[in-house]
Amino acid sequence: MGSSTRKSSLSLLGLAAAVTLLVTAPLALAAVTIEEYKEAVEPICKRNSETSTAILKGVKTQVQQDRLVPAGKRFIRAAGALGKAVTQIAAEPQPSEYEVKLDKWIGYLKEQKTYLQKIGQALKTGNKFKAQQSAVKLNKANKRANDTVISFGFNHCRIDSSKYL
């Protein structure tokens, strides 16, 4: 066998290996079950819930006492924590049969991050009314998120913002 024939054979083998990887990688991702997905995301949600609880503990009292700037900063910190959690959740492989539903849920989680940030910004500027408007929208996004994934039986990935607002 000549040198160019060997190179062609190696190139074809390399190409075949690459095609095999491209074809089988999505199949491996599709093999994730909803139970495996829950096992992956529940710890992320639990950490975020604990973090948010710690950040927002007593924030309702701060708002009632018109200590709006520190309360606003806390909402912004909670938004950052949620954003980090959403990024981690979005990176988890999803069961292919639930991709649309899970992508919708992740979209609602991103909305929640936005509303937490808006609440924080409004409070920092002393605008309680605007903060309340964003809080109402946050609660609606929470409900939509919870309704979207209720059938999965999430425990820590269910959202209850009533303890903060």
Image (cartoon, rainbow, N blue to C red):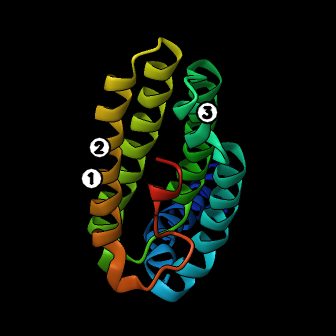
Q: Residue 27 appears at what percent x and percent y?
A: 44, 77
Q: Secondary structure at mark 2?
A: helix
Q: Quadrant of residue 80?
A: top right
* Residue at 51%, 78% in the rendered image: 28
Disc 3 crowd, CA 10 A, few/some/many (<14, 14-19, 20+): some
Q: Residue 133 appears at what percent x and percent y?
A: 28, 33
Q: Is residue 33 visible?
A: no
Give the residue at the far top of this rendering.
Answer: 125
Q: Which residue is mark 2?
A: 136
Marks 2, 1: nearer the viewer: 2
Residue 12 lies left or right of residue 54; in this view the side is left
Marks 3, 1: nearer the viewer: 3
**Quadrant occupied by the N terminus:** bottom right
Q: How many marks?
A: 3
Q: Which residue is mark 3?
A: 62
* Residue at 56%, 34% in the rendered image: 75
Which amino acid type is marked by label 2?
Val
Are discs 2 and 1 less than 8 Å apart at CB? yes
Marks 3 and 1, how far apart in space?
23 Å
Q: Secondary structure at mark 3?
A: helix
Q: Secondary structure at mark 1?
A: helix
The first of marks 3 and 1 along the sequence is: 3
Q: Is residue 156 visible?
A: yes
Marks 2 and 1, how far apart in space?
6 Å
Which amino acid type is marked by label 1?
Lys
Residue 146 lies left or right of residue 52; in this view the side is left
Give the residue at the far front of this rendering.
Answer: 65
Which amino acid type is marked by label 3?
Gln
Which dot marks residue 89?
none
Q: Residue 32 appears at what percent x and percent y?
A: 50, 81
